[in-house]
Image (spheres, helix red, strand yellow):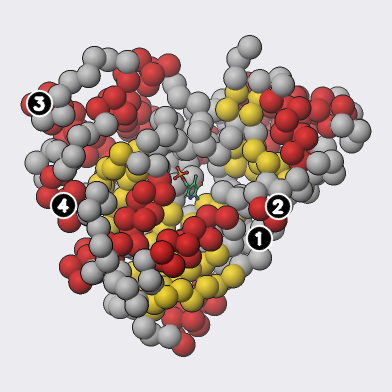
Amino acid sequence: MKMYLMTPGPTPVAPETQLAMAQPIIHHRSPQFMEILGKVREDLKYLFQTEQEVLIFAATGTGAMEGAVINTLSAGDTALVIDGGKFGERWTELCNVYGVKVERLAVEWGHAVDPKAVAKMLDANPAIKAVFVQANETSTAVQHPVQELAAVTKARPGTILVVDAISALGGVPMPMDKWGIDVLVAGSQKAMMLPPGLAFVALSPKAWEFVKTSKLPKYYFDFAKALKSADKNQTPYTSPVSLILGLREVLTKIRQVGLEKIFAHNRRLSLATKAAMKAMGLKLYSKDNPSDVLTAVETPVDGQKVVAELRKKGIWIAGGQAQAKGKIIRIAHMGFIDTVDLLGTIGGLEEVFNQLGYKVAPGVGLKAAQEILSKEAAV
Ligand SMILES: *Cc1c(COP(=O)(O)O)cnc(C)c1O
């Protein structure tokens, strides 16, 4: 049986990438490897749309999130955390562990933050040194308005914007330099089409200034040390050689295809998915800025059961987390996903809903999806 990973991480990996990663291990201090890392460094700048160095760590995305906290702040500093879901909570947890004071801006699940509310909090408390947010809050499938938030922090020399784009980078536009994002965090196993195991982070010149004064303890995730090594096409410790070979393959493809086309592809799949869900009588869970890389809908039957039944067909989608558990399902359409994967998932969902007692006319979701797909040109 085939397995379809329609989950918001991990996502499917292309056969060419798998083959690249199956190559013999070379030494991480060899000239061959340094040449590869040199190429990867350049291509990562294209993906992040930045002129700054993109640091690579052998970790999942959370490692780079932790790094972002400990490299820019000190104990006793104050941070503003935008918390509109499970991953927003993670920023607070990280700050708590390291003694960073948190001013929490709670956003109702399914909604996006209002940049004006952030500006107001920063005006009220000029001591706030960092604003932490998710580009795409994966637990609610909502995109926070990163560009507008960056406009708010850009005007304040004492405050940086730290963006967790682990599920967004490579899937939706996130031009770091143009928007003025200060710290941009990504991970390999979502829109970047790689296995789990690589974390990435890039810092603006303003954020590098913060690094100079940060006093929180750090060892493996020491950004300054990683930057020094990167200048020599190295990582401070053993490089995850196989994953880097896969990364080189993926980044080469991304550059060949072009970011704009990839974003348009994701958007096309997103529109088709959302139309299909609506035709099946399901409501979007995301009230503001519904994500282009995944779709969350409220389910009339137990969402956990929908997920479990669909798995029996080889199709993996995600349920809700925490307060949304059982109430929603989440279908990812990020990375190496095509229209066949998507239509199969929608067809499978129609069957499962009928099986679980929520009656949908067979083909009603598929028809709506196909109408969108035929209107929106393939890219
Ligand atoms: C997946 C995800 C993470 C965590 O990634 P890990 O790979 O589990 O460390 C963090 N933030 C967002 C928005 C995510 O989607």
Question: How far apart are the two marked residues, 3 and 2, measured between alpha carbons?
Answer: 49 Å
Q: Earlier in the sequence, mark 4 or mark 3?
A: 3
Question: How far apart are the two marked residues, 3 and 1, measured between alpha carbons?
Answer: 48 Å
How far across and down, in percent of the image, does residue 212 sit?
Answer: 18, 68
Identify the amino acid type marked 4: Lys
* 349 on left or right of 335: right
How far across and down, in percent of the image, does residue 228 sit?
Answer: 12, 50
Viewer can see residue 252: no
Q: Which corner quadrant of the image does residue 317 belong to?
A: top right
Question: How far apart are the two marked residues, 2 and 4, measured between alpha carbons?
Answer: 40 Å
* 308 on left or right of 80: right
Identify the amino acid type marked 3: Ser
Viewer can see residue 182: yes
**Mark sitting on residue 109:** 1
How far across and down, in percent of the image, does residue 372 sit?
Answer: 68, 34
Question: How far apart are the two marked residues, 2 and 1, measured between alpha carbons?
Answer: 9 Å
**Which element type, helix, strand or loop, lies under badge 1?**
loop
**Mark sitting on residue 30:** 3
Identify the amino acid type marked 2: Ala
Label 2, on which residue?
324
Q: Depth check: 172 or 21 in front?
A: 21
Query: Of discs 2 and 1, which sits in the foreground?
Result: 2
Q: Earlier in the sequence, mark 2 or mark 4?
A: 4
**Which element type, helix, strand or loop, lies under badge 3?**
loop
Quadrant (top left, top right, bottom left, bottom right) of the N terminus: top right
